[in-house]
Image (spheres, rainbow, N blue to C red):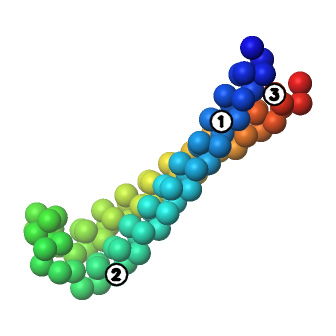
Amino acid sequence: MNDLFARRVHAAAVAAWWTWLAAVVFLSAAWLFFIRLIPNPPDWLVSLWAGFSTDAIQIVTLWVVGIFKMLLWLWAMAALWLTLWARQLEKR
């Protein structure tokens, strides 16, 4: 039972790191997309944001990316904790 539990914790740690990596790639792509579009936004982007000004779009985007980065930091800490826990279980 203990060996099965250790393997499951290890699998959870590996899955957490792969999910974190996918989220970082998505965040980077979204950030590059907005950096490219925000200085001179096309009409479809402004209409997508229901007529918000470019400054409002920049502020909202900055807040969303910042909050997402903080959540990624928490996710990385949880994945690190799972990794360390799995190593301790494997030693026993």
Q: Earlier in the sequence, mark 1 or mark 2?
A: 1
Q: Earlier in the sequence, mark 2 or mark 3?
A: 2
In 3D space, how far apart are the residues under numbered discs 2 and 3 (Cα atoms)? 46 Å
Q: Nearer the viewer, mark 2 or mark 3?
A: 3
- Is residue 16 positioned above or below 91 on the image? below
Dot 1, how many residues are within 10 Å of its Cα: few (below 14), some (14-19), or many (20+)?
Answer: some
Residue 60 position, x and y percent, is 30, 62
The answer to whether marks 1 and 3 mark residues whose Cβ atoms lie closer than 8 Å is: no
Q: Amino acid at mark 3?
A: Leu
Q: Tell me the residue that label 3 is attached to.
A: 89
Residue 18 position, x and y percent, is 58, 50
User: Which quadrant would the N terminus be assigned to in this image?
Assistant: top right
Residue 81 position, x and y percent, is 70, 38
Q: Amino acid at mark 1?
A: Ala
Q: Tell me the residue that label 2 is attached to.
A: 36
Residue 45 position, x and y percent, is 18, 72
Q: Nearer the viewer, mark 1 or mark 2?
A: 1
Which element is circle 3 on?
Answer: helix
Q: Tell me the residue that label 1 is attached to.
A: 11
In 3D space, how far apart are the residues under numbered discs 1 and 3 (Cα atoms)? 13 Å
Total labels: the figure holds 3
